[in-house]
Amino acid sequence: MEISGKKSFALIFVASILLFFLSYLIGNAIFQNKSYNFMVKYTSNDNIASDDVILVVIDDKSLTELGRWPWKRNRTIQIFDYLEYYTDAKVIAYDAVVMAPDFENPKSDKYFFDNVHKYDKLIAGIGFMNENFGDNIDAAEYNAILTEKSNLKIIDKRRKKQKGENFYKSFTPFLKDYFKNIKLLGSVNTYQDQDGYIRRIDQLVEYNNALYPSLGLIAYSKFTGINEFVLDDEYIRAKNDKYKLKIPIKTDSGIVFSYISFYKTKDGMYSHKKISASDVIKSLENIQQGKKPVLDAEIFKDKAVFVGANANAQALFDIKRTPISDTFAGVDIQATNFNNLIDNKFFTTSSVYYDFAIVVFAFLSVMVFVSVLPVSTALLCASCAMLLYFVFSFIMYDNRIAIGLIMPEIFMLFAIGCGYSFKYLVEGKKKEKIQTAMSKYISKDVMKNVVQNIDSIKLGGKRAEVTVLFADIRGFTSISEKLSPVEVTKILNEYFSELVPIIEQYNGILNKFMGDAILAIFGEPIKNENHPINAVKCANKMLKKVRLLQEKWLNEGKPKIEIGIGIATGDVFIGNIGSEERLEYTVIGDTVNTASRIENYNKVYRTNFLISEETYLKVQKYVDVIKIREVSIRGKAKKINIYEVLRILDDN
């Protein structure tokens, strides 16, 4: 079943739209996060972490100097004591969750639990979970205690339709004595994307119809003195005389999160200044012994200190995959969040609709280039567009605005491929139509030869042996005077339509129509050593076809038409003749003239099919002939023998 042009276009259009969306979805899933990582990493090289943030880490050095893990919990108290009482640090943020008792050192545990309430600067970590509490936890009691562990006022001005269903259903099951005594808790939840990378952090967690702040946000409150925050659909806002906070956020299933703006790291693990926990503990012990401390307490003055662990010991190894490093310390993620809050610098991400609109715009723009501009200009414009978009993306990321990078670039390349593929198909269709149309004026084989040698067409040709067939309608002038022009045209069109395919069937080419006459060539440009017999067989079949047409026309009341055919074999000049502006592929030579003159002798001897002696000598094994006589051919000094072909002896 043939498909119409409009239906074909509609099918191509629908298939293109489906392919576009499928490519976008697959490409977005594969490349979007990778391009985000790439841009964040390289734009973070100029983003230096604040000196207001210090990390105190239980690292390999600490374990080497103070003993293997696990330590007694009084070691943690030593860290807190030093930072609380012997430095002017503003905030101590403890990136750890205490859930399991130390059965080997219960006294140390009791000392830790009894003293943890003493620290006014201390904020501990809490992890919210999407599973319900276990049977060993009194959920109502734990939820009641949790409400006392935040001193922030969150004014929620979000639209209800954006709040969504709560994702978290419980939190880390602390040891009860620790949970009761710790004064402040902040969420340490980070969101890990499907590829395992952390790009965002929970700022506010909606749990039990209340909003709980992140460790970084509550540390920011204690650091700045701001404890009232306004939450709307796009930002968390707060301010006092010294600080002003406006951070972009997104809300999903009760989680208010921000995209982290990372800082440059020297070792791939820490972007903030790191101090070994052993140096802090030794400094405290030296002070208590009247010795000089290892650390100068001034380095902690007015600083926010984040305490955590990251060592090769199995329980302490805490690294995360982030856009800037696959070995980024977990405690530094919390510190980075706080640093972002102090700097008021987070990443803003473009919406899905914006990214898709940019892809569509980029695709269509390049399609326009391809459609209206020459190839070299279009490719140059497309390359410039790709370069400019990359520069634009880099500038946007440098200003912490994350937009889609790879997909617009990919779809600009996709547009080049689609554009030129479409043009190729369209132009191919046009060429086919042109060739079909032109083949009605010149031979299909000549047309094929022209197309194959399109770059080397020029005036000139060659000498070759061919067989020329000349067919003419007897007395057509007198016949046409009795008919109307429309009737004459119909008869000629039907006549030519029936005879031309026969010429092609025998590897001949129709050289031209000459009024009611046909000039055909065998042997060039279609190479064939048997061109004389092919020409003779062609003529025989043409005469048979004319006899059938005669019967048909007589039944239709049309005049009886007879034709005569003359064939000659010999050398001719064949090729492109004319001027640089107008060429004609034709044959010139005595053989053409001979074929025409021989055909005229059909009228003299009342025959239909005459051939030259040169032709006869090449086909005598295959034909039954009568030698007519020697005849004079105008332009030839010598007479030549001509033969009437009666029948083909072996038509195979």
Image: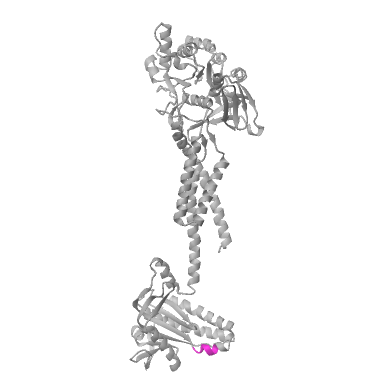
Name the magenta segment's main secondary structure: helix
Bounds of the magenta span? 474-479
Pinpoint residue 276: horizontal percent, then vertical percent.
41, 18
Residue 20 at x, y = what percent? Answer: 53, 49
Q: In the rendered picture of this protein, how many numbered marks are placed on residues? A: 0
Q: What residue occupies the far right of the structure in this picture?
A: 160
Quadrant (top left/top right/bottom left/bottom right) for the C terminus: bottom left
- The quadrant of the rendering that contains the N terminus is bottom right
Which quadrant of the view contains residue 55? top left
Quick check: is 477 in the magenta stretch?
yes
317 up-or-down from 502: above or below: above
**Residue 446 versus residue 557: which sits nearer the camera?**
446
Observer able to see residue 614:
yes
> 35 or 544: which is nearer to us?
35
Extreme-top residue of the structure: 290
Image position of 415 (left or right of 576): right
Q: Could you tell me if residue 208 is visible in this image? A: no
What residue do we see at 59% from left, 19% from top? 150
Q: In the image, is residue 18 above or below residue 244?
A: below
Q: Is residue 218 left or right of residue 627?
A: right
Residue 648 at x, y = what percent?
A: 40, 84
- In the image, is residue 522 part of the stretch drawn in magenta? no
Residue 531 point in image, percent of width and height: 37, 78
Please tell me whether residue 586 is drawn above or below residue 236 in the rendered image.
below
Q: Residue at point 45% right, 52% down?
A: 379
